[in-house]
Image: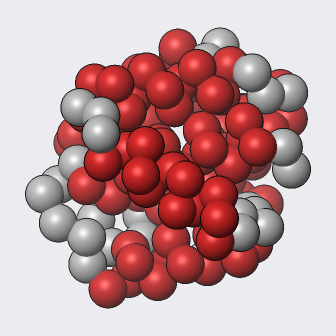
Amino acid sequence: MNTNYQLGLLYLVHLLVGVDGQIDDREQKAINTLRRSENIDDALYHRFAAEAAQKSEREIYHSGIEYMNNCTDQERLRAFAILYRLSEADGRIHVKEVRLLLYSIKASGVEFNDVVKEAEKVNIF
């Protein structure tokens, strides 16, 4: 996987898990599993964390979309399928998570139905 994919995924995951105001144990475990499954090394994760700490929520969103738009179609589809699955990690889907997913998917030119189909195949959590 390329760095744009990994950073885009991290930025959007950061927004998604924080959208309901809290990161519970299941979401944190899912993030750690995600880092392993997508081969996101510690150096890249720390780079992301340092960058994200300096940005507003809006800037984080735009950075995530920019990174995603520099990915292949398959990488974008996989990323949004992962985000879709992650939104289910805490056992409930918050309306803000749905809104974030829909806006992000649209901004990246991915079809929602394709994301749902791909999410059925993604088994990283």
Residue 5 against residue 125 in the figure, above or below? above
The single residue placed furthest to the left in the displayed view is 21
Residue occupying the point 80% across, 38% down? 75
Left or right, 33 with respect to 58, comes to right
The quadrant the C terminus occupies is bottom right
In this image, 20 relative to 114: left or right? Answer: left
The coloring applied to the image is secondary structure
Residue 107 x %, y %: 52, 14
Quadrant in the rendering for residue 26: bottom left
Q: Is residue 92 above or below residue 36?
A: above
- Is residue 22 at least partly visible in the picture? yes
Residue drawn 75% across and 21% down? 70
Residue 102 in view here: no
The image shows a total of numbered marks equal to 0
Identified at 37% across, 33% down, the residue is: 60
Q: Residue at x 41, y 52 (%)?
A: 50
Q: In this rendering, would 56 be left or right of 105? A: left
Which percent across, then down, holds residue 48?
51, 50
Q: Position of residue 93 (x, y in %)?
A: 30, 56
> Looking at the rendering, which quadrant does residue 72 occupy?
top right
Residue 80 in which image quadrant: top right
The answer to which of 2 and 22 lies nearer the viewer is 2
2 to the left or right of 37: right
* 29, above or below 65, in the image: below
